[in-house]
Image: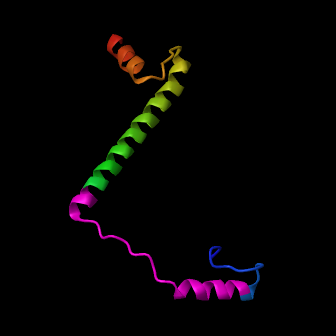
Amino acid sequence: MVAFSIGSKNDAGDARAIWMATQMPGKSVAVETEAQQAALALHRIRQQKIKFRTMQRNCLRGLLPEYGEVMGKSRQLWTRQFRGA
């Protein structure tokens, strides 16, 4: 309601701002097609996969020092160290 408020903050000003906001035309929202929804779903799944993979790596990196091992942060070092294991 900040965009519609005029003057100091009080109940009368808030009521006027709410009334002004209801008189303004709403913003239209585009309806997404099935293809757009599917693409967004794939992006969301990919982001979740990346987040989960990162969580697993960080968890493993936290546990390895207890066994005397140290793991690098980069993905290349990660795969190189596992290939050598």
Write the start and end of the magenta stretch as one range: 13-38
Q: Please, which residue is most extreme toward the top here?
A: 84
Question: Measuring 44% from the left and 30% from the top, which residue is drawn there?
Answer: 57
Q: Tell me the chief SS of the magenta region.
A: helix
Above-or-below relation of 37 to 27: above
Question: Measuring 48% from the left and 18% from the top, which residue is drawn there?
Answer: 71
Place of residue 37 in the rendered image (x, y in percent of width and height, measured from the top left): 27, 60
Place of residue 19 in the rendered image (x, y in percent of width and height, measured from the top left): 60, 89
Place of residue 55 in the rendered image (x, y in percent of width and height, measured from the top left): 46, 36
Q: Does the magenta portion include 15?
A: yes
In front of the other: 17 or 77 = 17
Question: Measuring 41% from the left and 40% from the top, which residue is drawn there?
Answer: 52
74 sits left or right of 37 in the view: right
Above-or-below relation of 60 to 11: above
Query: Is the N terminus in the top left, top right, bottom left or bottom right quadrant?
Result: bottom right
Place of residue 17 in the rendered image (x, y in percent of width and height, measured from the top left): 64, 83
57 sits left or right of 45 in the view: right
The colour scheme used to paint the residues is rainbow
Query: Is the C terminus in the top left, top right, bottom left or bottom right quadrant?
Result: top left
The number of numbered discs placed on residues in the rendered structure image is 0
Quadrant of the image occupied by residue 2: bottom right
Quadrant of the image occupied by residue 3: bottom right
Above-or-below relation of 5 to 34: below
Q: Please, which residue is most extreme toward the left here?
A: 35
Quadrant of the image occupied by residue 16: bottom right
In front of the other: 34 or 9 = 9
Q: Does the magenta portion include 12?
A: no
